[in-house]
Amino acid sequence: MPSSFEKLRSINVSHLTAKKGKLDYLPWTHAWNELLKHYPNTSYNLRKWPLIIFGKEGPIWMESTEVPYLVSPEGYMVHVSINLNDGETPSRYADLFVMDSRNKAILPKPYGNGADMFDINKTIQRCLVKAVAMCGLGLDIFTKEDNPLDPSDVDPPELDAKEKRSESTETEEE
């Protein structure tokens, strides 16, 4: 009997994807719907952190108020865990930072313009899809490859400038 990961990994969700610019993505509604078809007892949780407000005098910790995001001078982060509740699969986790339309971290005020609840909610839903992918469903979408688990199909990482110069020098010498 295949594991839950293998079972979910084998489900083709390419017909459920949408595009934003050049990127394909799986809308959270499709990811959640497809997951519940196979694991109807699945649940997810959002990690909660104390609210931190950045003022002119520095950060203020609001210990009695918890929010579903971490805020720091570097930006905001959300954390989602998924439990298939099938009695054998461990919980899977995903983190994702809150980003703008250019995929850059949104910095809290006074360091930047700050994120609003729309930005945070959108990131929570995207993080949920990422956690679903950690369970196997839609994992291919994140790799943008036809057969991403075959290492021979994956392009090598880009060389940094020093390695490129070294490689071109070696080629010229030959």
Image (spheres, rainbow, N blue to C red):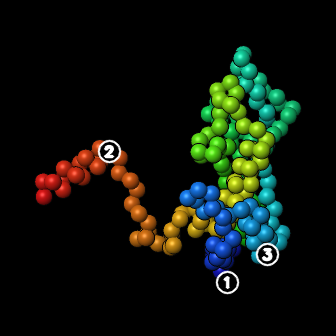
Report the amino acid beneath label 1.
Met
Q: Give the labeled residue for mark 1.
A: 1
Q: Give the CA separation, mark 1 to mark 3.
A: 18 Å
Is 73 above or below relative to 131?
Answer: above
Q: CA distance from mark 1 to mark 2?
A: 48 Å
Q: Is residue 116 above or below residue 109?
A: below
Residue 109 position, x and y percent, is 70, 27
Which residue is disc 2 drawn over? 161
- Can you identify the residue that label 3 sits on? 37
User: Residue 41, how many percent across, how many down?
Assistant: 83, 69
Residue at 38%, 53% in the rendered image: 158
- Residue 127, image x and y in percent? 69, 54
Query: Mark 2, residues whose alpha carbon is within 10 Å: few (<14), some, or many (≥20)?
Result: few
> What element does badge 2 sit on?
helix
Residue 12 in the image: x percent, y percent?
A: 64, 76
What is the distance, in whole Å, between disc 3 and disc 2 at their CAs?
48 Å
